[in-house]
Image (cartoon, rainbow, N blue to C red):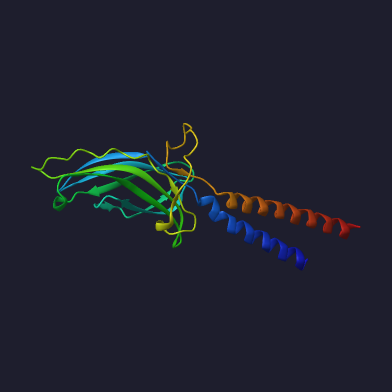
Amino acid sequence: MKKIIILLGTVALVLALAAPALAASLGISPSHVELEVPGDGSATADLQVHYFSGDVQVSLVDIPLRVEPEVLHVDALAEPVDVQVTIYGDESLGSQVYNGYIRFLGLSGETVAVAVKIKATVTNIVEGQPVPKAVPEETPVLEAAPEVMPEELSPSPAPPEPRATEPMDGVEGLSLNMVILIAGGLVFLGLIVLAISLAVRRRRY
């Protein structure tokens, strides 16, 4: 009986370790936003978060402006959640067009579990100053970085064709290691159930 209790405890531990893997998916839509921001004001982007529950850290890449909120708390496992990201202009920079990214880091405790970047074209407008011609846009980039810091992020393949209930772009799913871990836990659980059944039969006879 003690052995059975120990085995059941092991199974519970395996499943507990697999649970964070299920939450390590993050999607952001749309995949590209364009904003005109007054130098003495702000502009807001309406976005949706998909597949993730927890804290999401927001920052700008290659755009020297301020963004709020810096951290979002969302629960989007069941359905997408609408969020707003506000970017503030800066008169000291003059009229400029910035082609960069809004980066979203899904956090698990103090560790980055998954990261997604969406393309952002932000025009900082200062009254009385002409806006320079925009630089041609680059291809949108999707990044995923399980268990790494933001500086170590690397591009991942583009997501599959979207379905009606999925975001257009900016989606990152479970990794192969996570799937293997979950499958291994389920197989192990099956073996435990079989062992318990055999033990019960032996006691009966």
Quick one: 79 or 93, which is closer to the camera? 93
Extreme residue in the left direction: 128
Q: How many marks?
A: 0
> Residue 39, image x and y in percent?
15, 47
> Residue 162, image x and y in percent?
47, 34
> Residue 154, image x and y in percent?
45, 51
Quick one: 42 or 98, which is closer to the camera? 98
Q: Residue at x 72, y 62 (%)?
A: 7
Residue 158 in the figure: left or right of residue 135: right
> Residue 166, image x and y in percent?
46, 36
Q: Residue at x 41, y 50 (%)?
A: 74
Q: Residue at x 78, y 53 (%)?
A: 194
Q: Residue at x 46, y 41 (%)?
A: 79
Quick one: 19 or 148, which is closer to the camera? 148
Extreme residue in the right direction: 205
> Quarter of the image containing the N terminus?
bottom right
> Quarter of the image containing the C terminus?
bottom right
Extreme residue in the top direction: 164
